[in-house]
Image (cartoon, grey):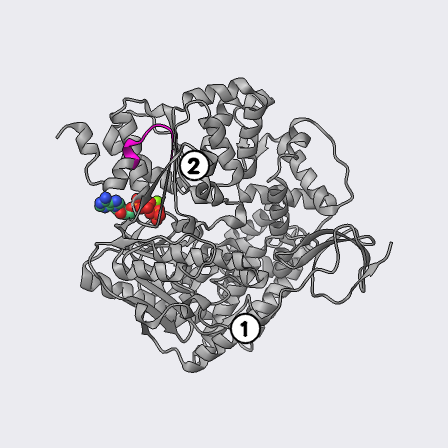
Amino acid sequence: MNGIERLKENLNEQQLEAVTETEGFVRVIAGAGSGKTKALTQRYVYIVEALGINSSNILCVTFTNKASQEMRKRVKKLVGENSDLSYITTYHGFCVRVLREDINKIKYPKNFIIMDVEDQKTVLRQVYNELGLTSKVFTFKQVLRYISKQKTSQEYLQYILESKKKETDNEIEKVFIRYLEKQQRNFALDFDDLLNFALYIFVNNPDVLEKWQKRLHYIQVDETQDSSQKQFMLIEMLSQFHKNLFVVGDPDQTIYEWRGAKPEILVDFDKQFTDSKTIIMNQNYRSTPNILSLGNHIIKNNKIRVDKDMFTQNPEGVEVVHFHGENDYEEGLWVANEIKRLIADENCKHSDFAILYRANHISRSIEQSLIRENIPYSVFGGIRFFERKEIKDVLAYLRLIEFEDDFSFLRVVNTPSRGLGKKFIENVAKIAEKENISLYSALQQNISQKDLSRKGAIEFIELIEKYKKAKTDLIISDLVKEIMDESGLSAYYRTDGDTDRLDNIKELQNSIILLETQDEEQINLTEYLQEIALYTDMDIEDDRNDRVKLMTIHTSKGLEFPYVFLCGFTEGVIPSAMSIKERRAKALEEERRLTYVAITRAEKAFYMTESEGFNFSTGLNKYPSRFLFEISDNYFVRKGELSQEIINEAKKQLKLDASRQLIQKKFDVGDLVNHFIWKQGKVIEVNEEKGEYQIEFIETGKTKPINFEFRGLTKIEK
Ligand code: ATP
Ligand code: MG
């Protein structure tokens, strides 16, 4: 067998066609696990090896950094170490390459800064300070969303690249403009800018565009269903010279419509490129028939889709399992035990398991169980729950009250700020050293000393002393609440604008309440902190690679794992509370596709788990996801007891939800209205999908979202 024959090995007929049809516009539409990515990777190698094209002339766009790393690894094995594989990359990665080479065209230096979300928040903090804003007006999340939305259009580039000035009275727009000014001054680009800047350079510099067009002889795009209009515009521009474009995707796996994904690009590819070729792949190589048919069964409920006819020759395998727990503790424990059982029985490794969830906070109960059961794990694309800053801050207060340790002291003495700077801490440290006592004791015993008796320090000592006395009379959840309020930590995180942090703290309180209601004997603070210490300080000694993988469904895109658990399969989590509130079919269909993506990651076994309890985001009792009730009983077996009562309650809620009529708008953009508290306002946006107006109130100068159904609004006739 010669080298080229070997390249065609292990491919089915359609994959072979995809690999060898290298010229012109070619599209592959196929379901999950049908070998699209495999064909795309193999095609890349074929172009290099069989056609003799240099890898630096092929652009291969993948959806995530992880996917491109994996593809590079695979390609490297086949084409050798010395090839330049840097054009196997993401849209962002490619734009950075373009900018690094050509950003001087817009008078930016080549060593421009790329900002991550934390950097963006740092800028916002500065802007809030300057404008005297607090997050009561807008949270960072709202502002970042606003900024990102503004950046879907390229208009803002005039203000940073063409020195156009903009005046405004609108508060959020003021924040945006200041944000842009700071970006420009620092030559800093956020993620949205990368694509916009690259497009701007191409559109305004035909010579630069031509250079890139000529360089990229072949272009391939994976996961095309999640490309946005602008991303695809870039690809289309680049492919205009050589006209060799290969796109693959699965419209049923579109999970980024909320961020601008346009599955139509893939679906209507043949209309845009009339001489294009389409290849369909129907065989699934990834999953057992049970998993595959569950996926097909669920996705069939989406109305806006083209049905596919998938089959597999893989062996039957085990049944899909649904586990219902009495609370999230039981859910986590069941998952941990199932992992242990499989490792013992099936001779598999920790790294064969993935635990997927819709929302980050779901990981808390799972992580606790894994730690308790000594199962090594890593959280992908996120921070472990108990390592989050805000969680550590809260726990540090508790620890200081209980243990007076120096670590906790240093963490909280000036969090939130009490004006106790470095010099002050040094003075305390000197006394502590001399007298061989803890930092806390040093401060407490010498608080009347001249250089220590600051207002902030006195209040801090009073606070800690108060709760040292009160702790025996308070249950831990109340203690947390009172300390959060009195220390100023609540206010600090509220004004900080980062509402994720408050959500995480709520989740911590939630877990303590659960612990308190579960244990017959009240757990005391020492016991609690010792248990928690295991979660915070424990670094499980193990080979880093052999770990259970925890990640959101979004992160799991394109990946596969032998065993997959979808945890928190709860109404209000998936589908998300937001998508339910929006009450539109499209949002729910995206949630169903997310479920489909989760299911189709699994090779050998798939589990869906959920539990009872209280859902803080809906303010209702938890009950199983509506998608669970869409699955006929013969598709899975049930473990744990799901009472008829809960099933009835869940179905009743669903009916209630469905019967709520879509409420019609009463006002249009430009209408003047009277609000019974905020008085006169002007409708500046009508969002029919969300059932919400944006109204700018004249007296306060603030813009607020108001529901269609709100009755306290009347129209002022002009
Ligand atoms: P997704 O839509 O989830 O991204 P995909 O269509 O990209 O899925 P791949 O990840 O390429 O699917 O392939 C799924 C699995 O099937 C991989 O483990 C791959 O190696 C295997 N596979 C694909 N094609 C074949 C084949 N012809 N013979 C054997 N195994 C195959
Ligand atoms: Mg793929």
The amino acid type found where label 1 is placed reads Leu
Q: Is residue 23 magenta?
A: yes
| 510 vs 275, nearest the viewer | 275
The amino acid type found where label 2 is placed reads Thr
Local crowd size for mark 1, using a 10 Å CA cut-off: few (<14), some (14–19), many (≥20): few
**Splitting the image into 4 quarters, where does residue 579 fall?**
bottom right
Local crowd size for mark 2, using a 10 Å CA cut-off: few (<14), some (14–19), many (≥20): many
* Rendered residue at 75%/45% (across/down): 170
- Does label 1 or label 2 sit earlier along the sequence? 2
Q: Where is residue 622 in the image (x, y as percent from the top left)?
A: 48, 72
Query: Which disc, if any, is residue 90?
Result: 2
| 81 vs 573, nearest the viewer | 573
Compared across the picture, whether 655 is left or right of 299 comes to: right
| 139 vs 483, nearest the viewer | 139
| 398 vs 481, nearest the viewer | 481
The magenta stretch is 18-26
Residue 604 visible in the displayed image: yes
Q: Does the magenta stretch include residue 366?
A: no
